[in-house]
Image (cartoon, rainbow, N blue to C red):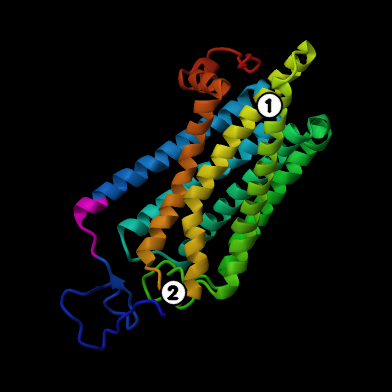
Amino acid sequence: MEPEFISNKTDVVKDIHLCYESENLSCIMVITPSTIRVLLYLFLGSLSVLTMCGNLLIIISIIYFKQLHTPTNYLILSLAVADLFVGALVLPFNMALSVSSCWHLADLICNIGRSLEVSLSTSSILNLCFISIDRYYAVCQPLRYRTKMNYHAVVIMIVVSWGVSGLVGTGIIIMGLNEGKCKGKCFSFHIPLSSITACILSFYLPAIIMLSIYLKIFLVAQRQALSIKNTNCQSIKSGASVTKMERKATKTLAIVMGAFLICWTPFFTSMTLNPLSNYSIPIPVIETFVLLGSSNSVLNPFVYAFFYSWFRVAFRMIISGKIFQGRFANSKLF
């Protein structure tokens, strides 16, 4: 199915508006009521501000407070940076597309915007994948954790996640994500069948890996809980408190991963099925899935604040401006 366009050389019905009146292959303009446009501006604008502010709090907390300088938190920092860029760049871009059905800026800006969207979502899921590996060693192989998940390994993971995501975003553009569109549209989501490979590599495969790892962690944590319950040894109790903290951290990060999958699965599923169904999925539906996926970036800071008392303490100190009144970098948060 080709993108919708109309020729100016034919008789045009009066209630049909075109993106470019002087173009022969102009896209049809969808007229959005002013009330809906205002509501979209308010909703997406607020979402963008919340996303930036929330993830900025995480970034400042991890960078400023030395107690938060851990391998796991550096991976969370990388995830927060990706989410911050989503709020600052992707959400305003999607807001412009959602409010107006026509794209009057350069195609280069359209390509860059879509590439950033794909790259940042891929970076998020790869960071979550590496976080699940970190949690696996912390819970399932605690004696090997410090040797396996050191700062050198974390740096490699972060570089790989951002490098691969950049290649995927660039590759989708090169493979012709915007081919076959009419004049005045910023991508019609008519991706070639070969782009399904990118969806598999950037979403489905990491998601399967994460789900498998967290299932393994859950089973190990269950066995540990039974072992702790059946012993009264004081030394075991001391180790049990550490294990409990690791399980809580794993549970929190599993919730973060679950929220990510719930938000992004509809989009990647529709992108996979669309070329197989002769592009029968309406573009507004896919654009709604894009907004659902982008909204995930605002959830993570609230999850951390809800489950981690030390993040709540750090957030309060930052918001109150206390960190600017003295040296609190070595403060005990937990």
Q: Is residue 127 left or right of residue 104?
A: right
Q: Quadrant of the C terminus?
A: top right
Q: Nearer the viewer, residue 119 or 184?
A: 119
The picture places residue 12, in percent across and down from the top left corner, at 20, 82
Q: In this rendering, is residue 224 above or below 189?
A: above
Residue drawn 56% across the image and 45% down it? 82
Q: Which mark is residue 56?
A: none
Q: Nearer the viewer, residue 109 or 310?
A: 310
The picture places residue 8, in percent across and down from the top left corner, at 26, 84
**Crowding at label 1, few (<14), some or many (≥20) Cα neighbours within 10 Å?**
some
Amino acid at the residue labelled 1: Ala
The picture places residue 76, in percent across and down from the top left corner, at 62, 36
Residue range highlighted in magenta: 31-37
Q: Which mark is residue 279?
A: 2
Please say whether residue 185 is one of the residues in the magenta stretch. Answer: no
For disc 1, the marked residue is 225
**Crowding at label 2, few (<14), some or many (≥20) Cα neighbours within 10 Å?**
some
Q: Is residue 177 left or right of residue 6?
A: right
